[in-house]
Image (tube, rainbow, N blue to C red):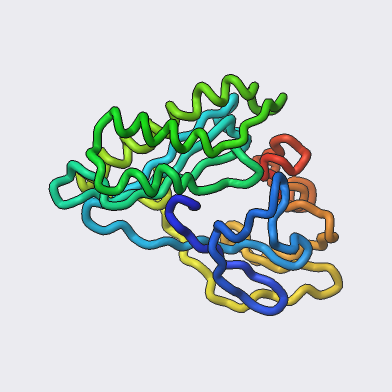
Amino acid sequence: LLALDAEAEVAGKGGRQWLPVSSLFAGPGRSHLDASREMITRFRWHRHGPRQASAYERLAKREVMSLPIACCGVDLELTEDLQHFAWIRIALGPVADTPFRATCAEDWLPGEECSEENYAIAADEAALACTLRGSVLRATREYREHVLPVLIQRAIRRAVQAARSGEQQSIAGRFAWDRTWSTAAATPAADGTITFRLNGETRTVEGGAKATLGHLLREELGLTGTKIGCDEGDCGACT
């Protein structure tokens, strides 16, 4: 989403507003949203035009957990000859206090040839902007330093290939998307209850200021297919 320059719709008691995704991150495990009064309801970004494409690479100990060792998103446009970069956005995480754009590599690549040598140079430049640390939940700092440039090169290469082929990528990935978004006003909180649509049905639950979405889905609504990842609020699966 950061590479796509996406915006998030934030619903709160005062209504709904669109905010850049890049403005939401406050630090490790923190955002600029008030978790007791606001929630993200959907995202939006520009549809790709000719010679434009994106790619995402992710490495994790377990693919089912939202706790990657490192990840990289790339969005780009090629020149008319399909041999050079017109512009590119490279987003990285969790390799610093917040997800960020590797502007050093983004500023260098436009006009450069789409070659393996330039992919490697850009990857090394982007990796230098990271502040990696070891984590018992992710991996050692040394391992992350080793794999990050590889992920960046892969993402750039795949995005270039997609832009050259003109392949139209589904916004839902491998899943079929048949839902429509609600345009209704946010439901005001009353006596601590929250009303929302879930799997096509209107549901009302009581949730305190510290109740997580994962807890409400599993404990209050019995949807145990929802899994809790780290159980510390670090991976985001429960929120």
Name the residue furthest left: 81
- Residue drawn at x 69%, y 72% is 12
Instruction: Tell me which corner region of the image, top left, top right, bottom left or bottom right, holds residue 109.
Output: top left
Of residue 233 and residue 128, the one placed in the foreground of this image is 128
Q: Would residue 169 be visible to someone looking at this image? A: no
- Residue drawn at x 55%, y 70% is 18
Name the spot of residue 96 as percent of width and height, x first.
62, 40
Name the spot of residue 234 as percent of width and height, x first.
71, 41
Q: Is residue 161 above or below residue 143?
A: below
Q: Would residue 39 be visible to someone looking at this image? A: yes
Name the spot of residue 188 as percent of width and height, x first.
74, 76
- Residue drawn at x 41%, y 42% is 105
Name the spot of residue 170 as percent of width and height, x first.
35, 50
Number of dots carrying numbers: 0
Q: Is residue 32 above or below residue 71?
A: below
Relative to residue 14, is residue 54 drawn left or right?
left
Relative to residue 121, is residue 37 drawn left or right?
right
- Residue drawn at x 40%, y 52% is 171
Q: Is residue 173 above or below residue 205?
A: above
